[in-house]
Image (tube, rainbow, N blue to C red):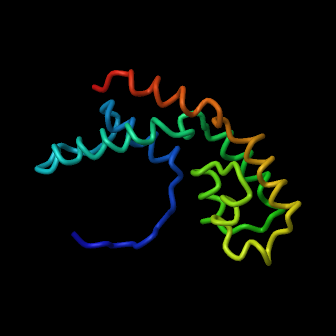
């Protein structure tokens, strides 16, 4: 296997989850091949994992609104994506995600970021419930 275009795009957990669900439900345009069994296992395991995260509550509108709310903070694309995927709930988590956060963000901005995450990204307290619900769903 050869990588033709390295890092062509970064995908959010929501995008990967949606794509894998389409594959599971036969909506993809992929033709069955010799590696179909391995692909099925990867799709199943990844979907199962992502089904236990808050990405199941996200929609394109939620993501768009969240990205708009992040504009004043001058974060990189990768930092925004990590905030979206990890949904941090503490200042320490923000500091781990945002490179050189001590120089780039004030304590007030870090607190504001936490409020933005809480306001725009559903999940949090529902995360445990979602994981249990999703595990009970039947895979086809």
On the image, which quarter does residue 134 sit in? top left
**Residue 51: percent from left, percent from top:** 45, 35
Residue nearest the viewer, comparing 17 with 83: 83
As drawn, 102 above or below 116: below
Q: Residue at x 39, y 21 (%)?
A: 136
Residue nearest the viewer, comparing 24 with 80: 80
**Residue 23: percent from left, percent from top:** 33, 38
**Residue 58: percent from left, percent from top:** 60, 38
**Total tally of numbered discs in the picture:** 0
Residue nearest the viewer, comparing 40 with 124: 124
**Quadrant of image for the C terminus:** top left
**Quadrant of image for the N terminus:** bottom left
Q: Residue at x 46, y 26 (%)?
A: 132
- Residue extending furthest right? 108
Query: In this rendering, would 47 be left or right of 89?
Result: left
Q: Residue at x 77, y 56 (%)?
A: 70
Residue nearest the viewer, comparing 109 with 140: 109
As drawn, 97 above or below 66: below
**Residue 4: percent from left, percent from top:** 33, 73
As drawn, 58 above or below 86: above
């Amino acid at each position: 296997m050869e990588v033709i275009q390295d890092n062509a795009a970064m995908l959010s957990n929501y995008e990967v989850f949606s794509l894998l669900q389409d594959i599971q439900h036969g909506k993809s345009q992929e033709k069955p091949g010799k590696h179909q069994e391995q692909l099925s296992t990867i799709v199943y395991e990844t979907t199962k994992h992502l089904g236990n995260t808050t990405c199941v509550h996200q929609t394109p509108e939620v993501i768009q609104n969240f990205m708009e709310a992040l504009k004043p903070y001058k974060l990189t694309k990768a930092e925004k994506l990590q905030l979206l995927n990890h949904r941090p709930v503490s200042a320490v988590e923000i500091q781990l995600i945002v490179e050189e956060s001590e120089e780039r963000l004030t304590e007030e901005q870090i607190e504001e970021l936490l409020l933005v995450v809480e306001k725009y990204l559903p999940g949090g307290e529902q995360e445990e419930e979602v994981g249990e619900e999703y595990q009970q769903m039947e895979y086809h």
